[in-house]
Amino acid sequence: MRTDIPQPRSATDLGCSWRSSLKPLRCTRLRNRPSKRRESLCPQAAGRGRRRALIQSDGQEHLGSALTSYGKRPFPGPSGNTGLPLKILPLGGLGEIGMNCMLVGVYDRFILIDAGLLFPDFDDHGMEKILPDTSFLSQWKDKIEAVVITHGHEDHIGAIPWVLPALDPNTPVYASGFVLELLENRLKQYSLWDSSRFVKFNVRERIDVGPFELEPIRVTHSIPDCCGLILRSDHGTIVHTGDWKIDEDPMDGLSFDREALEQVGKEGVTLLMSDSTNVLSPGRTTSESVVQKSIAEKVLSWDNKGRIIATMFASNLHRIGSIKAAADAAGRRICFLGMSLTSYLEAAQRSGYAPFDPRELIHPSDLMDINPNEVLVMTTGSQGEPYAALNMASRQASNNLKINQNDLIMYSAKMIPGNEKRVMKMMNRLSKQGPEIAMGRGELLHTSGHGYREELEEVIKLVQPQHFLPVHGESVFLQAHAEVAKELGIQRTMVIHDGDMVGVKHLMRKRTVSVGSMGSMKMLGQVNMIRFYNDGNKGTGTNHEMGLYERGILATEGVIVAAIDVYRPPRLSEMINKGIESGEIESGLRSRVRLTTRGIWTDKGRLVKELCKVAQATVAKCPVDSSLMAVEKAVHTRVRSASRKFNGRNSEVLVIAHEHDPRAGDALAAINQRLAKNRDGTTPGPVTPRYSTQRKKAQVKSNTRNPRTPATAAGKSIDEEGEGGQVLISDDVSTGSIETVESPEKEKKKVVRKRRTKTTSTAKKSEEGELAGSDGEGVKKKKSVAKKVTRKRVTKKTAAAAEKSGDEEAGKNLPSAAQLGDLVPVPEEILERRRRANPRENPADNPGADLDYG
């Protein structure tokens, strides 16, 4: 950390003053008092005392997958000290307004200029921030030697909590005093603040930053302490303007530094990068002092008519100072509604840029007790943010701000593209409550912070660069700005976008155009930049990880959810064996479907009934050996097609299939395992599942006991979930009844009893071996085994006879031969040993033989 950087100049040296034709207000350049540095002076702070930072992360949990490596992406351009020396690689800001982040370097040594975010569009459902490619920065952090911040707007510092963890912990961050105050407040919320890492710079002071000698220069903008950058190196000089306009009469007295640009132009500038935001606007921007006069006239005209409510960008401290001066002239006191207003004012107070003493503010709780003719309320919500104070008041949901018919609402801001609809809805709600509203260009209540075309031309003429690169703007703005440079004689221009690396070299003789001189600026490579999205909390990831496509489908097309209870037929192994022999496995699956919808027109439930029938018919056509995944895929395709045909919507369909009897899934897995072994060339054997899937038709007692799965007739609609959607529980119409199985306890006892049964050969071996120990004990065990074997033979014969003679009563009380066969497969070595002991026994003809493990 540098210790030789001098303190900021005093207010007298800077000639700082707030101009007002009504009541001049001096800029309060408060000295930093270390003992009271963190103490809040704003009444809005919690408890009217020390303001606590809202902790949003422990330093890691907000990152999500922002630092995840998405494959080894090569760094574009030639490596080492080869090729063009000066390199530019934008990660954001070229092709959109916002997310300004750019790598600028000499050969393989780079610095990062700004780390901003992009505000999401209306179709980025649920997202609040769009971040640059931090995974790329993390992969190549060894090339980045420093971070330089030009000013404190969110599109230049908003991504800092994600960018800093991607870099080396020792990488320094350079910024002005006001920006450092904003960064400190922000990074403490994410547990990332480390004072030793941050370095304060002053304008017109040269310091070594990475491969460059950095000189910040003063530019005017809509936020205090804004800088442009002059980057000098042995291979050429780069000028980066930052965000700027030329204000001839700035409110804080800090004028645009034309002298610095003229001086560096005489030295020779290799590359100029300039703000392109307002290139399509002819003329020059309106000075902030003109806006101040308009605000003062509007405030004074509302004398003794009621309360005044003003909304603006919280970062525009110049505008806040103008409104404060007008309020003083009208004898009104100021009240802030919105934490961002307080945050910026406190940061300005600590850095010495506060337009007035924060102690002069009144607390929001006192607002209702003050005469409306003596108060002026400054509030957030100029962009229609859902939870901003003005938007809450428009919905009559604010505790501190109630709109009256005698109020005057001054809209002193610009609608950011994409927010127009939201802002106009808010203003319409306010208008219905009866106040007078002042907004629009004719009122002169706002001016842009970005230079118009004549100002852009003036800067190009002052710098006279060899090469020109337009930055900060949409593609059409960049192209138009490049045409302006060409009209002024700068022929070596190029338009690039995020991920494009351009190389530049200094021309020794500026006025000489030799063969191949256009090769002094060319494209060196390209990298596919990944955008990361944050939901305003701890969720951060790519568009796929944050489910933006699914969010869009759910928001515009609706969702269908189907739960499929799959019933597999009895004697599953026999059906599959026959299907293998014949070459086609027959269908026979039955199902019970529960289906619900959200955000879809269902024609009073008709869509739900039709989709239920489609799902059941689709399951019925599936082969009996279909996996649950295959069932889900088939139902998904048919239901989605049927829904599209019904209402023309491409709704999201979610299908969840499960086995009615979980043992059927185990049986199918055992069958597939045996078939896989047979395909590998092993000895073919009978296909037998692990457990029996034979079911008996029984009463619907088990279903009626569970209130969550009521037994209903086929096609009956049950509205279980209110107005949000309909739910239909439907049984397979082909069966006419619901089948259940015996209780798991009985089935378990039956399987255990069968597993413990021994064959005659086992009994003989046991009799000759282990049971030959003691006479008494051996005789008892011998008799027990004999009884078990006899019971087993009788059971098999009786079950076979019952099946053959059609004795239903015997079939109910005794297990069938198929049931005895659909059990645990016998290892091949045991079968082979049994064949040697009894050559006449064929396992394929005697399924009961598979019970013996030997």
Image: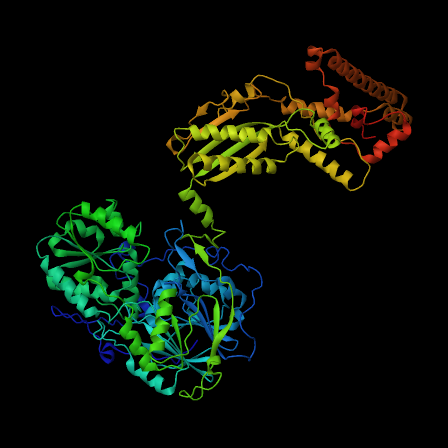
Q: Is residue 234 left or right of residue 156?
A: right
Give coordinates of residue 170: x percent, y percent: 49, 71
Position in image of residue 781 (x %, y %): 84, 22
Residue 588 falls in image quadrant? top right
Locate residue 123, reporting x and y percent.
39, 51
Q: Residue farthest to the front?
A: 515
Q: How is the image coloured?
A: rainbow
Horizontal side, residue 569 vs residue 597: left or right? right
Quadrant housing residue 328: bottom left
Q: Residue at x 63, y 30 (%)?
A: 662
Q: In terms of depth relative to the viewer, which is nearer, 359 or 785?
A: 785
The residue located at (43%, 43%) in the rendering is 554
105 shown above or below 798: below
**Visible residue check, residue 510:** yes
Instruction: Classify 280 as above or below 713.
Output: below
Judging depth in this view, the residue of 357 and 774 nearest the camera is 357
How many numbered marks have been drawn onto this rendered protein structure? 0
Q: Quadrant of the N terminus?
A: bottom left
Considering depth in this image, is 743 or 733 the residue closer to the camera?
733
Q: Residue at x 46, y 27 (%)?
A: 609
